[in-house]
Image (cartoon, rainbow, N blue to C red):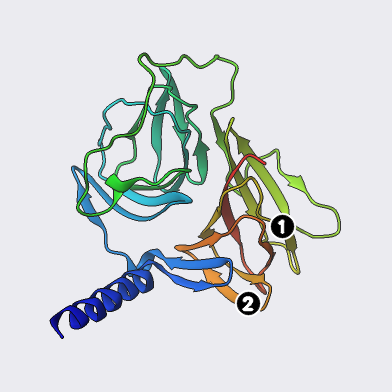
Amino acid sequence: MRKRLAVVFTAVALLALDCAMGAQTGGVIFHSFESIPFQARGRMQLKAVVTDEGSIGLAEVPAGAIQAGHRHQQEQAVVVVSGAIQYSISEQLHKIGLHGGALPPSNSQHFYTNINDGPSRFIEYQPVRRHDWIPPFPANQSAQSAEPVAVAPDKTVARDLSLSSGGWARLMNTGARVKSLPGETILLRMIDLSANNASLDMTASGGRAWFLYVLEGEAQFSAGKTSRKIGRDTVVQIANGQVFTLRSPKNGPSLIAAFSPVP
């Protein structure tokens, strides 16, 4: 009887854990950062969604905070949500303002400095499971090269991706705009759905899940029989091969960051 009760208890515990990770519908999982508490990681406060398909975290750092320089084999993508940071990538300094992005290449030495007068927040995506981002916070064991890999001075590793910046591509007959920061293995793509009736049909590709993060406003997300309004601080995890549609709200800005493998 005790063994049976233990099995039932374990099953209930696992179900509770799955529910805490997000609401799943078909090939889509919805995560809300509002329901995930910040956890102290040194001077950083961090909340994260960590899966076998990739990890996405929201970090808040106080004014003057400086990260220790480090490197790892996987690329990562960063977007500033509020405030501003300075990002050092292979000894090149880049100022990343609101909705600016950075993409340190594989094994390049990198670190951030919060240059804002107050706290700054940024979202970070890595296409691996980052066990060390969630309790009990084990030591980071990410693979890395014996020596840092230099980045060519002419390689674009940071870009202003805000709505007011230039260089956006307007997609014909959809009203949507797209602007990207590509890496070797991952792609950071910003999607602007602010125009009335703007929409975008996409298919998650590249062999791994995509992650969408709503930076500003809201949008209508549809995939198969699933249709849901997504707002700020919403993370949508989309399985490889899943077809989905994003549509604009009735009014106001709508900006979404899409993190995906390079197809």
Residue 128 rendering spot, x and y as whole percentages? 43, 43
Residue in the foreground of this view, choosing between 129 and 69: 129
Q: Residue at x 48, y 33 (%)?
A: 75
- The residue at which mark 2 appears reads as 227
* Residue 39 placement, left or right of 259: left
Helix, strand or loop under label 1: strand
Visible in this render: residue 119? Answer: no
Residue 59 rendering spot, x and y as whole percentages? 33, 49
Helix, strand or loop under label 2: strand
Could you give the CA–CA distance between mark 2 and mark 1, rounded to whole angstroms? 15 Å
Residue 134 rendering spot, x and y as whole percentages? 27, 53
Above or below for 51 versus 232: above
Q: Residues within 10 Å of mark 1 (few under 14, many from 20)?
A: few
* Residue 88 placement, left or right of 254: left
Q: Residue at x 34, y 33 (%)?
A: 142
What is the number of the mark on residue 202?
A: 1
Disc count in the image?
Answer: 2
Which three-letter amino acid code belongs to the residue tagged 2? Ser
Which three-letter amino acid code belongs to the residue tagged 1? Met
Above or below for 109 versus 67: above
Q: Residue at x 63, y 77 (%)?
A: 227
